[in-house]
Image (spheres, rainbow, N blue to C red):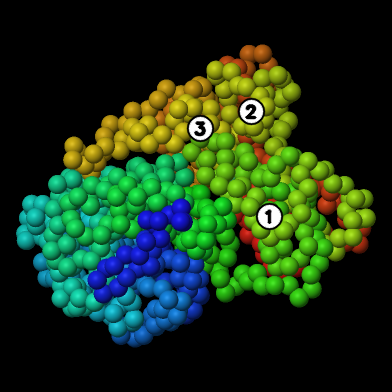
Amino acid sequence: MNAYPHLLAPLDLGHVTLPNRVVMGSMHTGLEDRARDFPKLAAFFAERARGGASLIITGGFAPNIEGTLLPLASKLTTRREARQHRVLTEAVHAEGGRIALQLLHAGRYSYTPWCVAPSAVKSPISKFRPRALSARGVERTISAFVRSARLAREAGYDGVEVMGSEGYLINQFLAPRTNQRTDAWGGTPEKRRRFAVEIVRRIREEVGEDFLVIYRISAVDLVPDGQTWDEVAALAREVEAAGASVLNLGIGWHEARVPTIVTSVPRAAFASYAGRLKSETSLPVIATNRINMPEVAEGILGAGDADLVSLARPFLADPEWVRKAAESRVDEINTCIACNQACLDHTFRKQRATCLLNPRAVHETELVLGPTRAAKRVAVVGAGPAGLACATALAERGHTVDLFEGRDDIGGQFAIAQRIPGKEEFSESIRYFRRRLEVTGVRVHLGRVVGADELRGGGFDEVVVATGVEPRVPSIPGVDHPSVMTYAELVRGERTPGARVAVVGAGGIGVDVSEYLTAQPSATLDLDLWRAEWGVGDPAASRGGLAAPVVEAPKHEVVLLQRKASGIGKGLGKTTGWVHRASLRAKGVEQVTGVSYDRIDDDGLHVSFAPEDGSDGPRTSRVIAVDSIVLCAGQESVRTLADELGDSGIPVHLIGGADVAAEVDAKRAIRQGTELAARL
Ligand code: NAP
Ligand code: SF4
């Protein structure tokens, strides 16, 4: 018997039976806004349908112009647009899949000057103050939802998802935080719910019985003056009575100051809300957020907390997630590590989404790894992210690949990252690549520092140098003092820090190291501690489900320094940086900016500051009395091998950190390695 009997069981939804319990949740890819991109979007969906997703939900499409996320962003308002969607629905149906269109009215989250909301209450994450909808405007908006649902049906969709969570328009009607109306659409919980319930009721009347109407319900708003649990439960019952087929969970508004999907959120952290909702209605319930491996999903379904699970980003990382679970190939799953670096961070920068671990995601028609017609012998040197991606993709294409690694294990910078509290998911990437090396037949040589002569005499047609980076040691007088260590020595456990630590450099790694130093060992992935730290309470006890945060005392006292005068952590990802900054504040990390490093001695780290008025006046000095100093001052490329091979006559390719250390970043490394493999 398969290890995932609940996950792989079919689900009868009346007019349609889903073959398994895995829904691909809605994600904005950046290909929704222009119909000319739909063939690429169709290829993206088709690959996921082929890989076993039982139901795909598209990114959000607005029911009218006021509801778009940005000017000219995706909407479904005309029959012409509906015809353009046919390429999407037909591609999924050709693979035997099902697809529902998400109807999303952004309300005050619309980044347009014409945005609307129940009341004229500005959102903290948008510069535009919304206009309050008139009573006629409310009616027109409901009609727009109904029209879009009808058009979705005409376009061949199997259903719609009505986006009622994450702080978008419908959610704005539901919460006193944003609904201050006193007419028929606000003033009491019943009237605040009326907008959501009417949308579902009228859509159901319009589309008939044989069409899925999924309602995305905000199980916990995680904002002050959000909904109470009683209000959420009443809404669930009312949308059921209005004709919804399924409830999908939404967690937290976009403006919430509680992380809900980043990698430091424990797996399945919000699944218990699905269980609570199940006891309130007889509708099938979909659990969501931080469900990235089959055993996590099976645990939720087996415990009876949900009928289905929704995975969004994990389908970017691996289109064959379901098929691999069904074929007992779970160790081959490319696990989403919830980093957001190439998906949500791209979306916020208005770039096309992809995946740090799978650069083919949303580029299926452009980055093609077909079989080679001229198999070569290729040496890849370095088993960090760039080398691993390149070696496995080359072998998959039919080349004969030898991978050389000087250390006694694979992983490179990932091996360091997995030791940071809240970044444990990186160990899944190492597991994935370890298995992928076996499956693709790469010959792996660990603990083998290979030289130019050996490669020259090895009969290789091509050499890929992916030798990575080493930590930069800045030229501060006294940097060889025994209190000084590199971040790599610290995190690998080769050096032990004292009680008070200075961290030199506040880029991604300096911030990670500060979290590593302040976290108590017990904090790692403990759901109760995580909830306490972020103030996640019970919506039955307080509106929005917020509680007063309780933070454990930091393990080490940390001072984090940088030379720039700008705020610390500005260069971190849009969707993750605020979580790191909040965490540093909560752990009492002292942040010192605008420093010059003068020297290091037995008293600690001596720094000085230019006068605040920018004049040439005398500098202020300070001794930061610490027991240990950790260098997180960026990296230098390791490329001696490439230099030595320079005139050997063998084509040499430099990738990853060995190519550009300043940007040492796994997204670029994996993409560069994969693209090279596609070309060779
Ligand atoms: P980084 O982001 O380039 O930061 C290095 C820091 O060291 C800078 O903040 C710089 O700040 C300081 N520095 C540079 N040269 C120095 C010198 N000679 N002396 C003293 N300080 C110096 O590099 P990183 O922190 O090593 O991170 C590398 C990459 O890993 C990042 O680009 C990121 O893509 C990735 N990463 C991201 C995250 C994340 O987003 N959470 C976490 C880990 C890694 P000042 O010059 O102002 O002092
Ligand atoms: Fe997951 Fe990161 Fe890939 Fe996004 S970029 S899908 S979060 S692994």
Query: What SS does tag 3 mark?
Result: helix
| Left or right side of 169 for 38 | right
N-terminal of the two: label 1 or label 2? 1
Amino acid type for the residue under numbered disc 1: Glu
User: Residue 181, image x and y in percent?
Assistant: 11, 55
From the image, which quarter does the C terminus lie in?
bottom right
What separation in Å lies between label 1 and label 3 (alpha carbons)?
A: 34 Å
**Quadrant location, ligand no. 1:** top right
Q: Is mark 3 within 8 Å of ligand 1?
A: no
* Mark 2: few/some/many CA within 10 Å (<14, 14-19, 20+): few
In this view of the protein, which residue sits in the foreground, 38 or 210? 210
Amino acid type for the residue under numbered disc 3: Glu
Q: Do the residues labelled 1 and 2 touch (CB within 8 Å)?
A: no
The quarter of the picture where residue 154 lies is: bottom left
Which residue is label 3 attached to? 515
Amino acid type for the residue under numbered disc 2: Gly
Which residue is label 1 attached to? 438
User: Residue 106, image x and y in percent?
Assistant: 29, 62
User: Residue 619, image x and y in percent?
Assistant: 59, 24
N-terminal of the two: label 2 or label 3? 2
User: Residue 46, image x and y in percent?
Assistant: 48, 73
Query: What SS does tag 1 mark?
Result: helix
> Which circle, 2 or 3, is nearer the viewer?
2
Q: Residue at x 27, y 68 (%)?
A: 13
What separation in Å lies between label 1 and label 2 (alpha carbons)?
A: 29 Å
> Which circle, 1 or 3, is nearer the viewer?
1
Q: Are marks 2 and 3 in contact (CB under 8 Å)?
A: no
N-terminal of the two: label 1 or label 3? 1
Q: Residue 616: in sight, yes or no? A: no
Is 401 drawn above or below residue 445 in the view shown? below
Circle on res. 651: none
Q: Residue at x 46, y 67 (%)?
A: 52
